[in-house]
Amino acid sequence: MNCKRKYKPLYLCCSVLFGLYALSLIFPFVYILLNSFKTNGEFIDNVWSLPQKLFAQGEIFKNYAVALTESGLVDMIINSVVLTVFGTVLSTLFPVMVAYILAKYRFRFSGFIFTLAIVFMVIPNVGTAVATYELFKEFNLLDTYQGVILLYAAPFGAFFLLLYGYFKGIAWSYAEAAFIDGASDLRVFAEIMIPQAWPGISAVLLLNGINTWNDYYNPYMFMPSAKTVSTGIQNMSFNATSTGAYTELFAAMIVSLIPVVTVFILTQKVLMNNTMAGGLKG
């Protein structure tokens, strides 16, 4: 009891600090949402005022309609969906396979490959950008879905370590029993190991999906002609500095956030529990 009283001021102080930090994260979202319902004139006159004109005219969602029809946002969303779906599958499948093999099988260069995976995490993507660009140019992969999707098919990274910890924590006795019954390595992997590691895999799948949807660097560098949500909104932001169409830009930003926010709200509990479990197993 005395211990609780002793640390109560510290708990209150931490709660206030974290509360202020949470407000600092929510504030930009509220600011953008509020101004997305204004006219450009209202926004320029007073960025802190409440929206009035569009409500009075009965055109509340005018900026959203303009963003979807005149700014090419629909095409950006389609491009982002294609890259997110295929990129997420590949960026999850390859780490799953490599993590499983290195965690459960011992062969001559397994330790070296694991060390190499850690080393690759240290090398920044910018350091290999020129070589990658020239390679894509040589194989005619620039400005194609295939090229950008291939970039996501990397087996190493932070998610590789998370999955490696999951597979390490799975007892090999299940696989041995299956081998005795005549199961192949592929069947053991697909029917025994994948279901047991599914909490970690599902967490990686969700995080990869969010990262791919928000990815700016790869589409900007290797698919400049076809805008995604990230690169397209950046282009809209640049144009807004000269046209003053900030409210349409804010509306487009809100639309682009809806899929990510929806997925996070629906899966946040599973996401938090599964990533923590993977860290503990590792």
Image (cartoon, helix red, strand yellow):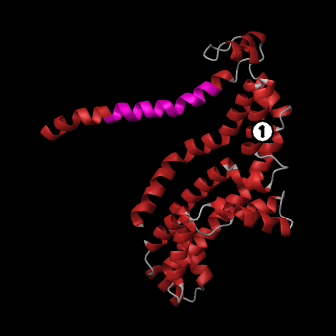
Q: Nearer the viewer, residue 28 or 266?
A: 28
Q: Secondary structure at mark 1?
A: helix
Where is residue 254 drawn, in percent x and y? 68, 33
**Image-based side of 260 in relation to 102, left or right:** right
Residue pictured at 52% horizontal, 34% vertical: 25
Q: Nearer the viewer, residue 149 or 62?
A: 149
> Dividing the image into 4 quarters, which one contains the C terminus?
bottom left
Picture quadrant of residue 195? bottom right
Picture quadrant of residue 201? bottom right
Mostly what secondary structure, the magenta segment?
helix
Residue 111 visible, this angle: yes
**Image-based side of 87 in relation to 15, left or right:** right
Which amino acid is tagged 1?
Answer: Asn
Q: In the rendered image of this protein, does residue 214 appear above or below residue 169? A: above
Q: In the rendered image of this protein, does residue 76 appear above or below residue 92? A: above
State which region is magenta: 14-32
Q: In the rendered image of this protein, does residue 247 appear above or below residue 150? A: above
Magenta segment: does it hold 277? no
Residue pictured at 54% horizontal, 28% vertical: 27
- Residue furthest toward the left? 2
> Dividing the image into 4 quarters, which one contains the N terminus?
top left
Picture quadrant of residue 265? top right
Residue pictured at 51% horizontal, 52% vertical: 271
Where is residue 180 drawn, in percent x and y? 51, 90
Where is residue 61 drawn, in percent x and y? 75, 23
Residue pictured at 60% horizontal, 25% vertical: 31
Q: Nearer the viewer, residue 281 or 244?
A: 244
Q: In the rendered image of this protein, does residue 219 appear above or below residue 157? A: above
Where is residue 199 drawn, in percent x and y? 51, 61
Q: Which residue is mark 1?
A: 235
